[in-house]
């Protein structure tokens, strides 16, 4: 996360704001857009340098506090906690569309293979799809309710954020062995290397930054 000091206060750019808030950069780009800020409540940038908007860290913290307060006011997920629900019902609870839910599943598979929760909780049931393509996932409603409540609190994963150098070390080591890793395999090895969860989403972000030649301490210009 890149920080600077402008007018005596700590600031960061959009990529840093995403990391600070524990949100996908794509989401921050949407909610921080000038036409969206009035609706989302995202703080306005305090300055613009190097072609990037810079946001005060204290304003980001205040935004997070407001969101947490709003989340605590949202009614809890109700229903039989032992009822199994599919991805479609899960998507309705999250308030997301089917393509978004499919992306969440894709981002979670690497963690699921390791027997742990990912972007979505580990399914309670997994079976082959009726046509033999893909899988069908189901979760107990009680576990879904617990995970939604946890996410609404705005919790973040602990530990240092993975860097481009971490990605390069894993990829270069594999290449030295003649291996060509998938994104999910890279995420798994980075998780093992760093001792903290590294998502497929983080790997993809770091791969973009590496292709653009940006050092880990800086974010790509927009």
Image: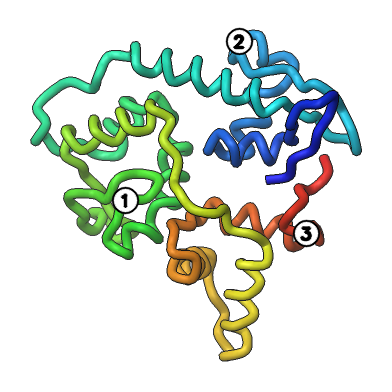
Q: Residue at x 83, y 44 (%)?
A: 221
User: What kind of element bears circle 1?
Assistant: loop
Q: Name which of mark 1 and mark 3 comes first in the sequence.
A: 1
Which label sits in the foreground, 1 or 3? 3
Marks 2/1: CA–CA distance: 32 Å
Left or right: where does residue 112 sit relative to residue 25?
Answer: left
Disc 2 or disc 3, which is closer to the eye? 3
Compared to 37, does 98 lie above or below? below
Rendering quarter of residue 120: top left
Q: Residue at x 63, y 75 (%)?
A: 169
* Residue 39 image label: 2
Residue 139 position within the rendered picture, expressed as x and y whole percent measured from the top left = 20, 42
Q: Would you name the residue on which mark 3 appears?
A: 215
Query: Viewer-proximal residue, 150 or 31?
Result: 150
Q: Earlier in the sequence, mark 2 or mark 3?
A: 2
Disc 3, SS: loop
Q: Secondary structure at mark 2?
A: helix
Q: Are marks 2 and 1 in contact (CB under 8 Å)?
A: no
Which residue has dot 1 on it? 117
Residue extending farthest to the front is 8
Q: Earlier in the sequence, mark 2 or mark 1?
A: 2
């Amino acid at each position: 996360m890149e920080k600077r000091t402008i007018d005596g206060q700590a600031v960061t750019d959009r990529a840093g704001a995403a990391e600070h808030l524990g949100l996908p950069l794509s989401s921050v780009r949407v909610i921080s857009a000038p036409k969206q800020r009035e609706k989302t409540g995202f703080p306005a940038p305090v300055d613009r340098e190097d072609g990037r908007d810079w946001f005060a860290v204290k304003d980001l913290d205040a935004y997070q506090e407001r969101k947490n307060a709003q989340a605590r006011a949202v009614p809890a997920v109700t229903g039989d906690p032992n009822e199994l629900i599919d991805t479609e019902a899960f998507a309705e609870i999250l308030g997301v569309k089917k393509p978004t839910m499919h992306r969440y599943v894709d981002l979670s598979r690497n963690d699921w293979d390791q027997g742990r929760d990912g972007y979505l909780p580990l399914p309670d049931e997994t079976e082959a799809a009726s046509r033999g393509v893909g899988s069908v996932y189901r979760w107990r409603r009680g576990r879904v309710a617990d995970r939604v409540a946890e996410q609404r609190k705005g919790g973040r994963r602990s530990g240092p954020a993975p860097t481009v150098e971490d990605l390069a070390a894993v990829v270069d080591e594999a290449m030295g062995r003649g291996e060509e890793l998938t994104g999910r395999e890279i995420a798994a090895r980075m998780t093992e290397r760093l001792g903290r969860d590294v998502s497929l989403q983080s790997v993809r972000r770091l791969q973009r930054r590496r292709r653009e030649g940006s050092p880990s301490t800086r974010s790509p210009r927009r």
